Amino acid sequence: MTDRHELGHDSDESDALVRPYVITQGREHSENVQLDLVSVVIAARGDVDEVSLEPEQLRILDVCRKPQSVAEVASHLDMPVAVVKVLLGDLIGRGYALARAPYTAESPVSRDVLQAVLDGIQRL
């Protein structure tokens, strides 16, 4: 019987290629949720049907107890960002997580909000 290592196959290397494909069921992106590296995600609820989730999804929810960017989640779990995006999309779709775009200086703020802030400051 021939060992895979004798044939020049490194099981860790082939597992690293196959595993993300299996985890995402062959999907390269989420169908309903658009996330980028700086999208902020957080676990939405504590009651989770652990049997219906993949171990990687449970790990994501654990990391997302505090708001995290998609890049931070991928880094914490040492997983490819593309895989994390697909799994987060599934979690968001099932109501287990929430996501929002990060606030930026270019984000439009309505005049009403600015006026309310100014009024609040003046009352101090």
Image: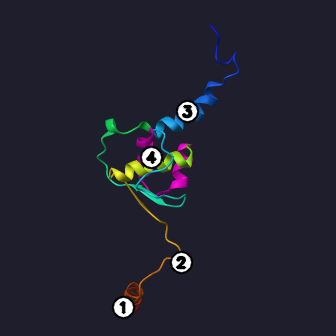
* Label number found at residue 89: none
Q: Which residue is mark 2?
A: 106
Query: How far apart are the two marked residues, 4 and 2, measured between alpha carbons?
Result: 29 Å
Mark 1 near mark 3, Cβ–Cβ under 8 Å? no
Q: Is residue 17 magenta?
A: no
Q: Which residue is mark 3?
A: 18
Q: Which residue is mark 1?
A: 123
- Amino acid tagged 3: Val
Q: Secondary structure at mark 1?
A: helix
How crowded is the residue under tag 1: few (<14 C-alpha within 10 Å), some, or many (20+)? few
Q: Which residue does the image show at 33% across and 50% down from the upper left?
A: 94
Query: How far apart are the two marked residues, 3 and 4, measured between alpha carbons?
Result: 16 Å
Looking at the rendering, in which quadrant would you find the N terminus?
A: top right
Q: Secondary structure at mark 3?
A: helix
**Residues in magenta?**
56-78
Q: Nearer the viewer, residue 24 or 61?
A: 24
Q: Main secondary structure of the magenta part?
A: helix
Residue 104 is situated, as x and y percent measured from the top left of the image, at 52, 73
34 on left or right of 11: left
Residue 53 is situated, as x and y percent measured from the top left of the image, at 36, 39
Query: How far apart are the two marked residues, 1 and 2, measured between alpha carbons?
Result: 28 Å
Residue 11 is situated, as x and y percent measured from the top left of the image, at 62, 25
- Amino acid tagged 4: Leu
Q: Is residue 47 above or below residue 18?
A: below
Query: How far apart are the two marked residues, 1 and 4, measured between alpha carbons?
Result: 46 Å
Q: Which residue does the image show at 51% across and 46% down from the upper left?
A: 28
Q: Earlier in the sequence, mark 1 or mark 3?
A: 3
Looking at the rendering, in which quadrant would you find the C terminus?
A: bottom left
Q: Secondary structure at mark 2?
A: loop
- Amino acid tagged 1: Arg
Q: Which residue is mark 4?
A: 87
